[in-house]
Image (tube, rainbow, N blue to C red):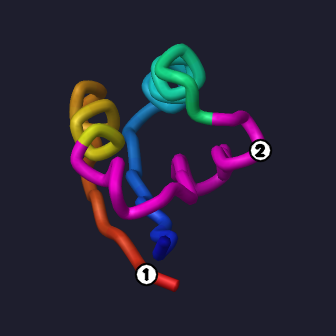
């Protein structure tokens, strides 16, 4: 199982916090979610098998940028 990190950049802290709430509500462990409040980034480390679900959740909150990296 390959892991990837999906990163989304937002315009506001509220959008970031709402995104995290949605991710946790979907069952993503809080340890897999990182918020960088200075740069307005939400990073999520997940298996590639749920990439589309995570991307959909991140996009609900209108990120200015969305990208991923595989490890």
Residue 61, compared with residue 58, is above or below; it is: above
The local secondary structure at tag 2 comes to: helix
Q: Earlier in the sequence, mark 1 or mark 2?
A: 2
Relative side of 50 to 41, left or right:
left
Q: Which mark is residue 31?
A: 2
Residue 14, compared with residue 34, is above or below; it is: above
Residue depicted at 47% across the width and 21% down the height: 26
Residue depicted at 22% across the width and 36% down the height: 56
Queried whether the magenta region covers residue 36, the answer comes back as yes
Residue 12, compared with residue 51, is above or below; it is: above
Q: Horizontal and vertical percent for residue 16?
A: 51, 32
Q: Alpha carbon of mark 1 to alpha carbon of mark 2: how far?
A: 18 Å
Q: Nearer the viewer, residue 24 or 61?
A: 24
Pointer 1 residue:
70
Relative side of 36 to 18, left or right:
right
What is the crowding at mark 2: few (fewer than 14 residues within 10 Å), some, or many (at least 20)? Answer: few
Q: Horizontal and vertical percent for residue 40?
A: 53, 47
Q: Horizontal and vertical percent for residue 11?
A: 38, 38
Q: Which residues are magenta?
A: 29-52
Q: Which mark is residue 16?
A: none
Q: Nearer the viewer, residue 69 or 16?
A: 69
């Amino acid at each position: 199982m390959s892991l990837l990190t999906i990163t989304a950049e937002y315009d506001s802290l509220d959008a970031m916090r709402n995104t995290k709430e949605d991710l946790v509500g979907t069952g993503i462990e809080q340890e897999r979610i990182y918020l960088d409040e200075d740069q307005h980034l939400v990073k999520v480390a997940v298996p590639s098998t749920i990439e589309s679900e995570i991307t959909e959740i991140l996009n609900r909150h209108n990120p200015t940028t969305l990208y991923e990296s595989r490890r």
